[in-house]
Amino acid sequence: MAGLIPQGFIDDLLGRTDVVEVVGSRLKLKKTGKNYSALCPFHNEKSPSFSVSPDKQFYYCFGCGAGGNAIGFLMDFERLDFPQAVEELARQAGVEVPREERSDRRGGNRPSRQDSPLYPVLENAAAYYRQQLRQHAQRKRAVDYLQQRGLTGQIAKLYDIGFAPPGWNNLMGHLATDNTEEKVLIEAGLVVENPDSGKRYDRFRDRITFPIRDSRGRVIGFGGRVLGDDKPKYLNSPETPVFHKGRELYGLYEARKQNRQLDDILVVEGYMDVIALAQHGVTNAVATLGTATSEEHLKRLFRIVNSVVFCFDGDNAGRQAAWRALQSCLPALEDGRHVRFMFLPEGQDPDSLIRSEGHDAFRARMVQQAQPLTDYLFRHLAEEAPPDSLEGKAHLATLALPLIEQVPGSLLRRLLRQSLEARTGMDLDSLPAASPAEPTSPPPMEPGHDAWDGYEHQYDEMPEWSDQPTATRPSRPQRQPQRQRDTSSVESPVMSATRTLLHHPHLAGLAKQASQLANEDDEEAQLLIALIDTLQKNPQLSTIELLARWHGTALGEQLNRLAEKEWILNIASANLEQQFFDTITTLMARQTDRQIQHLLDKSAITPLTAEEKQQLRELLGRRHTPTAEN
């Protein structure tokens, strides 16, 4: 298909793709510490030097220097062109690849990268609901409800709680002026159109509203809690091009915002549970959006933490939900990952319990009463197949083995089999291999509409990827191992600063005057400046998104080489942030000295103007002005 693949779609696709899964489906990976290793497929070797990082979402071979993200791996391993590799990843994710119309290259007009038009509409809706909570004539009903639930104005502001007033077309009348704008509201899930009568009306009416945000903090949908007698009690946005409730988690953005480092994540059942827990200091809670916990949810959580705690009501419905969650967890249980289940007393939910017993007691309950997944697994199965008879033990083994075989972590799977052997007295190794139970399929994923702001720097020009068929594409030469490396060369401070920034993108926001470095003519400095400029315009970019942004360009190759040497960042004696700021200060001083010298040289030939004299005074004063905040 003609046309360019939107950069926003590529970024979003990489954000949903696990490079470990992509590589692991083609190579035999072995867990080594926090990474995975294998024999490199790009050169012949006897001992593994090929490493895959789940944290950084890229691979690197210390033998031949091959490295990159999931797209790069498919290109090299499957001998695919860039569009074909994207198509393959999209196929595995169950989404279609959108295309932008290609402008006339001779005209020099390049299609701009635009976010979905739904994002500003949803953000405007959140602002409207927020305003109604402060100003609407019937706001007191909503405020009284929130205060009754023990919420403060501060926590309501943090989670952007709003109020959809009674009436059929309040929001529609506020945001739409014509039929076209009403259709956008329908597409965003904010307005409903009756298929029979064609009448349109607000989806959320007389409800407390809870904006649902994606990983970048953009509003993608809403939840609404009714204030009157309407049904259902809780209402969610429908599926839209930007909102897919089968993989989104309410409160995840806020949890990451409130916690610089998350050790574990608590999964609860409702919006109010998340907010009430945060009100009392438990800021690591998230909730599914009216759906059962899916394998996609678990994969997303395990990319952030290695420990997940499920919190369910102690009634029958809560236990059924817990068992469904356990079944979703099994295919995601790599060695080193932990899942626990906490069941609350009858009649209690996280909101009511933490209000009654407080933060410390609730935390203590999590530590003392949350059951490991393995304990809950056998306890639940023993209720159906008590192992107090030979028949019961056989039944227990029949139920447990297909579940155990779903666990990908080889060590955990082995320990689960040993535990089952101890409970049944059976030698499972002598039995035929069990057929794995059919796992519950997560809902199909659809393409996101993420895109970056237009960036006009010379490095941001993306290559015009061709759609050349694989059959006519020349074979890639096999990579030659780099057996002898030059260990005598010392990396420049500028390149060290660039690597630090690549792996710690938040530092760009602290380089206050980086724009003054735009005239720096050194190539290494230009690389650092390009990275700072991009991150200051797009502060939410992660390491993998930066690598994907310039994939296939000269800048991308330089960034890949820096990313591959992540181990340098782990040197305990290195004060990386201070080194980064020292480098910025040095570049600033060099730029200032160059400008001063230019003006002094000019003054030797002709008198400076008043503006130039003022500029010279400012430059001389800048020599002692800090350029970044520690």
Image (spheres, grey):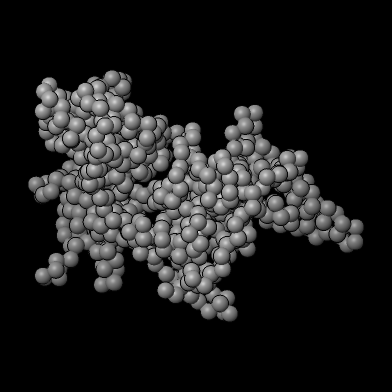
Determine the residue positioned at 65% across, 28% down: 573
107 w.r.t. 319: above or below: below
103 horizontally vs 127: left or right: right
Examine the rendering and report whether any part of residue 275 can be seen.
no
289 w.r.t. 99: above or below: above
Q: Nearer the viewer, residue 331 or 422?
A: 422
Furthest-right residue in this view = 604
Determine the residue positioned at 32% across, 54% down: 220
Determine the residue positioned at 49% across, 71% down: 471
565 horizontally vs 380: left or right: right
Q: Nearer the viewer, residue 127 or 484?
A: 484
Furthest-front residue in this view = 430
332 w.r.t. 124: above or below: above
Residue 378 in percent (x, y) is at: 21, 28
180 horizontally vs 509: left or right: left
Q: Quadrant of the C terminus?
A: top right
369 horizontally vs 517: left or right: left
Quadrant of the image occupied by residue 313? top left
